[in-house]
């Protein structure tokens, strides 16, 4: 009977596993292992309430079993019961002081509750025994940033990076922390290492903005092109690319980007303004005039558009008179 239950659990046939464990427990209700495995079967099926109840019954028989306590804590986390989960993790630490998983989980809980000093202490404890340290270093760094202990924060961020945590958010947080310390050179160096591979659109926008701020226009343009490829249909991205290309002097590329922005959104006022400016610099006065006029039409309070339109008319007239 027990063998059938275990076989079905291993094969993820949870309904059958539950049936066999229940049958076994009728004969041996004091088997902590059977109650714990019944909890696993319920958890696999998504029955959180029954999962938790099974673990609780197992713990009545073996209250210091850290595996069952950990499973109970995880079940509480899945059920979005952070207080109960934290209590279970604390019991794990009572039985096994310094347990890395329990310390890390309690650190995450404290960080979410803005108990930054507690969070840092838990993460430091977790790092002493953790096999994989990267994410814990990153979490510890976040806690130290909130405590304004920036030197400790950058130390942990750099250790996280060396341990393979190189997502854009973490690298940007490291760069930002260096900037808070007044170390602009180090901050710029880390901003330069940010990779946008697989990053969200929001993160990519932030990365591009930083490249623009640091006048790394080629890198900013590359990020915007990648955004266009991965998140098509956004007029603002084409317009932002146009702005960057204008700054680096690629007027043909800028004009193309602004035109694409306008095709995506014919009411993107800033794209018309950018197109007007690029065309004016390129000497395409008729198209510049149309762009400024359209911007003024869409936004009558755009004094810049109206003023530029008048200036372009004068230039066109002077050109005609000169010829």
Image (cartoon, grey):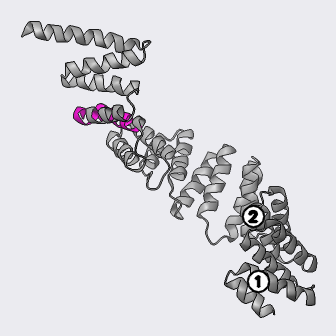
**Secondary structure category for the residue under label 2:** helix
**Secondary structure category for the residue under label 1:** helix
> Quick one: label 1, few (<14), some, or many (20+) residues within 10 Å?
many
Q: Nearer the viewer, residue 314 or 210?
A: 314
Whether the magenta-drawn stretch holds residue 249 is answered as: yes
Q: Residue furthest left?
A: 323
Whether the magenta-drawn stretch holds residue 133 is answered as: no
Whole-percent x, y for residue 113 in the image: 76, 48
Whole-percent x, y for residue 212 in the image: 39, 37
Residue 308 sits above or below residue 188 on the image: above
Place residue 213 in its image quadrant.
top left
Q: Is residue 296 left or right of residue 201?
A: left
| Mark 2 vs mark 1, CA separation in Å | 32 Å
Whole-percent x, y for residue 163 in the image: 54, 65
Residue assigned mark 2? 103
Is any atom of residue 172 visible in this view? yes
Place residue 254 in its image quadrant.
top left
Q: Is residue 114 left or right of residue 83?
A: left
Tell me which segment is drawn in magenta: 237-254
Pick whichever of labels 2 and 1 is earlier in the sequence: 1
Q: Nearer the viewer, residue 153 or 63?
A: 63
Is any atom of residue 249 visible in this view? no
Q: Which circle marks residue 17 in the picture?
A: 1
> Quick one: label 2, few (<14), some, or many (20+) residues within 10 Å?
many
Residue 137 sits above or below residue 303 on the image: below
Residue 11 sits above or below residue 235 on the image: below
Residue at 29% x, 22% y: name it. 276
Residue at 84% x, 78% y: name it. 65
Place residue 6 in its image quadrant.
bottom right
């Amino acid at each position: 009977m027990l063998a059938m239950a275990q076989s079905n659990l291993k094969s993820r046939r949870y309904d059958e596993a539950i049936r066999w464990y229940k049958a076994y427990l009728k004969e041996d209700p004091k088997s902590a292992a059977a109650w714990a495995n019944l909890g696993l079967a319920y958890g696999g099926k998504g029955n959180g309430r029954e999962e938790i109840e099974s673990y609780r019954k197992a713990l009545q028989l073996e209250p210091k079993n850290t595996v069952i306590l950990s499973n109970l804590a995880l079940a509480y986390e899945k059920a979005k019961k952070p207080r109960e989960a934290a209590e279970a993790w604390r019991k794990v630490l009572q039985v096994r002081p310094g347990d890395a998983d329990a310390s890390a989980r309690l650190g995450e809980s404290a960080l979410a509750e803005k108990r930054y000093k507690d969070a840092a202490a838990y993460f430091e404890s977790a790092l002493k025994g953790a096999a994989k340290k990267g994410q814990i270093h990153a979490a510890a760094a976040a806690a130290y940033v909130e405590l304004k202990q920036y030197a400790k924060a950058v130390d942990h961020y750099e250790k996280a990076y060396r341990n393979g945590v190189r997502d854009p958010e973490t690298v940007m947080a490291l760069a930002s922390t260096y900037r808070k310390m007044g170390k602009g050179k180090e901050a710029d160096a880390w901003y330069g290492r940010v990779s946008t591979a697989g990053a969200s659109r929001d993160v990519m926008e932030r990365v591009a903005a930083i490249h623009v701020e640091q006048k790394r226009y080629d890198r900013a343009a590359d990020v915007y092109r990648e955004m266009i490829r991965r998140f098509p249909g956004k007029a603002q991205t084409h317009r932002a690319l146009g702005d960057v290309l204008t700054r680096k002097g690629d007027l043909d590329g800028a004009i193309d980007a602004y035109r694409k922005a306008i095709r995506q959104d014919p009411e993107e006022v800033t794209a018309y303004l950018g197109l007007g400016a690029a065309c004016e610099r390129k000497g395409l006065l008729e198209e510049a005039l149309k762009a400024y006029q359209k911007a003024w039409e869409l936004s009558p309070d755009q004094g810049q558009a109206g003023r530029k339109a008048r200036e372009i008319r004068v230039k066109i007239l002077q050109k005609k008179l000169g010829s």
